[in-house]
Image: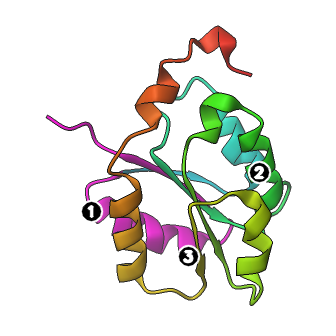
């Protein structure tokens, strides 16, 4: 039996979060939400397991933006393995994403079919199970 895959959506727009959550949830994924980058990092380093198999990350967020979130994520070895897909309405999203070592990026607005295919492709192998093996006291 396969474990249910988990997706963390970090998006400050409630309507976008809701649409994404509903569409991805209908695919059988477990969904967790954060509404800024700091909340996303806090979610990941807390004792909340299982870790996500994929993160959908808006780049323009309050408190801690998407680039700051990703830089912080990459500093924590057991979190750095979780693939991230950036989402942005910025016309320069491709250039902004280059230094962030992302699996993919989507320019808003995007088609849900495109996102669904990406999620299916990127969650075939679960890195969350590997990361969950890190003892809690070794987490930052």
Earlier residue among tags 2 and 1: 1
Asked whether residue 32 appears in the rendered view, the answer is: yes
Task: From the viewer's side, name the closer residue of 124 and 57.
Answer: 124
Asked whether residue 11 appears in the rendered view, the answer is: no
Structural distance between the alpha carbons of marks 2 and 1: 26 Å
Task: From the viewer's side, name the closer residue of 110 and 10.
Answer: 110
Q: Is residue 6 above or below residue 58?
A: above
Q: Percent from the top left, x then y, of residue 27?
A: 27, 62
Label at residue 69: 2
Q: Percent from the top left, x then y, of residue 20?
A: 46, 70
Circle 3 — which element? helix
Label at residue 109: none
Crowdedness of circle 1 by 10 Å Cα count: few (<14), some, many (20+)? few
Magenta residues (range): 1-29
Q: Percent from the top left, x then y, of residue 68?
A: 83, 53
Q: Is residue 92 above or below residue 102?
A: below
Residue position for label 3:
15
């Amino acid at each position: 039996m396969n474990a249910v895959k988990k997706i963390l959506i970090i998006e400050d727009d409630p309507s976008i979060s809701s649409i994404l959550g509903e569409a991805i949830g209908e695919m059988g994924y477990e969904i967790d939400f954060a509404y800024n980058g700091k909340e996303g990092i806090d979610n990941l380093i807390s004792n909340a397991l299982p870790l996500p198999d994929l993160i959908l990350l808006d780049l323009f967020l309050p408190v801690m933006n998407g680039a700051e979130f990703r830089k912080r994520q990459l500093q924590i070895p057991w979190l750095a393995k979780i693939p991230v897909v950036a989402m942005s309405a910025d016309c320069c999203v491709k250039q902004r994403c280059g230094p962030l070592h992302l699996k993919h990026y989507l320019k808003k607005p995007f088609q849900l079919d495109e996102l669904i295919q990406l999620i299916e492709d990127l969650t075939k192998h679960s890195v969350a199970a590997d990361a969950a093996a890190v003892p809690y006291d070794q987490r930052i």
